[in-house]
Structures are given as C-alpha cells and as structure tokens.
Amino acid sequence: MENKIKLNGTKIKIENPDLLDTLDIYAQYDAEGDNHILTGIDTPMKKNAFDVDDETKIKGIEYHFREIMELLGLDLTDDSLKGTPYRVAKMYVKEIFSGLNPANRPDVKLFDNKYRYNEMLVEKDISFYSNCEHHFVPIIGKAHVAYISSGKVIGLSKLNRIVQYYARRPQVQERLTIQIANEIKAAVHSEHVAVLIEATHLCVSSRGVQDVSSSTVTSYYSGKFEQESTRMEFLKYAGK
Ligand SMILES: [Zn+2]
C-alpha cells in the first residue's frame, strides 16, 4: 500500500505507518501554527508551573538549549557561542517570558479621582515585544488602551506595565488583547474598557509566507465602548 501525505506542500511517499502518523501530526502542527489557533483566554499552564524556582529553570533551559545548538551542528567551544545557552535561558525566564510568573504581575494602586468620573482615559502607542506561542519568534506591536473611570483611576504607567506583563509570555495576539482588557477591568473596577493592538508577527514576515508589510489588528470593546460613538472617540484619540 502506498501512502502519501502533504507536508509543507511536498508529497512524500511513506512506507512506515508509524512514520505516517508522525508526519500527519506534523502536517497538522504546521497548519495550526500558520493559522495561529487560539485555544482559550488563559495561557495554558501546568498546575505545578512554579514548583521550581527561576534558577533551576535557567539551568534546565541552558542544558536543553545547548542540546538544540549542538544538534544544529554549532561548535559550542567557540568563544562567541559558549555563553549563548545560558544567555538564552536567562532571557527566557527573567525577561521575555517573565510574564508567565504571577509573582511579576504588576501591583496596581487605585486613586480616587472624582474629577475624572465618567471621563475616558486613553493611553496610546504602548510599544511591546511578545513572542508567538506557535513559533517562538517575536511579535512586535503597539497597544492602545482606554477605560472610562468609575471614580477610581490608576497611574498611566500601570497601563503600560499591564501590557508588558501579558506580552512577556508565549502569546497569541487575540489572547493578549483579551488578557490586557480583563486585567484593566479588574484593576480599575470598570466594565468600560477598550484595547486595540496592531502587531507584526515575525513568524509571518520572516518565514512561512514571508509577508513583510502586513500587520494584524485585534480589538476588544466592552461596556460603553460597545456604543459606536464612544468607540469612535477612542479611535480618534488613538489616531485611527
Ligand atoms: Zn507564529
């Protein structure tokens, strides 16, 4: 029996049925990655994700990243490369994926501000760097966020910090948008929240279809922002 499967557009003849299963799964993985499937609002995490401390994680990732580099055929005795596994591991845990750890969630203090009751607060052009959870390459974007105060306000830099916290995870842009919106709602005790994100995905521009000019826009509107006039006001402030 001859089995054929389409993998990355190439037909390959497969004789071993076990291998066929694997290639079937790989073809499915390719398709899911290119379609950037979102499975849920919460970042999928293991229950015991924080049973190990950062230092242990860095050591483990350093070890495994060295294995990846070895498999790629790189000479890890070279002075330029020998520190890379450690640098990557530290960067993953302490910087670009530090938003996985609830300990790094920004503390938000609320202030009473009667004068700003019912007023729209917009923080626009918040730049962020995230990483696509399907390919582990960067997502570079800007977030525009707004809320209508229920009498409580937070420092504007906190809106920035909320965006950065959720960006520093393996992400899907739709999830990032919703996570930021939910966090702002909870932080300011208001249902009236808007989040607009424009981002470039390096997994689209630097590989795959290699489209360098496209960007992806996602938005979330709740409460008064579901009304067109309020949404238009927000978009005007955001420069859209
Ligand atoms: Zn991707």
Image (cartoon, rainbow, N blue to C red):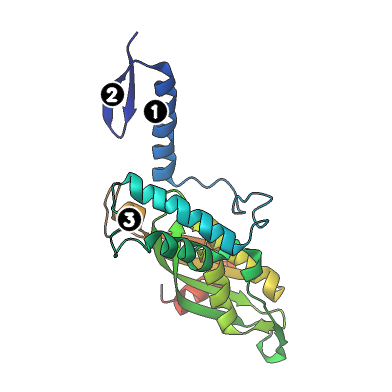
Tell me: residue 55, above or below residue 35: below
Image spot of residue 45 (x, y percent):
62, 51
Q: CA distance from mark 1 to mark 3?
A: 31 Å
Mark 3 burial class by Cα count in 10 Å: few <14, some 14-19, many 20+: some
Q: CA distance from mark 2 to mark 3?
A: 34 Å
Label 1 SS: helix
Q: Are marks 1 and 2 in contact (CB under 8 Å)?
A: yes
Nearest the viewer among 184 and 116 is 184
Label 2 SS: strand
**Residue named by callout 1:** 23
State left or right for residue 141 relative to residue 11. Answer: right
Q: Kindly give the residue lying farthest to the front in the view shown.
A: 77
The residue depicted at 38 percent of the width and 48 percent of the height is: 68
Disc 2 residue lies near ligand 1 with CB under 8 A = no
State left or right for residue 136 relative to residue 179. Answer: left
Q: Kindly give the residue lying farthest to the bottom in the view shown.
A: 115
**Residue named by callout 3:** 76
Q: Amino acid at mark 3?
A: Leu
Of marks 2 and 3, which one's residue comes earlier in the chain?
A: 2
- Between marks 1 and 3 in the image, the one whose residue lies nearer the viewer: 3
Residue 12: image tag: 2
Mark 2 burial class by Cα count in 10 Å: few <14, some 14-19, many 20+: few
Q: Is residue 240 visible?
A: yes
Q: Amino acid at mark 2?
A: Ile
Image spot of residue 219 (x, y percent):
51, 62
Q: Amino acid at mark 1?
A: Leu
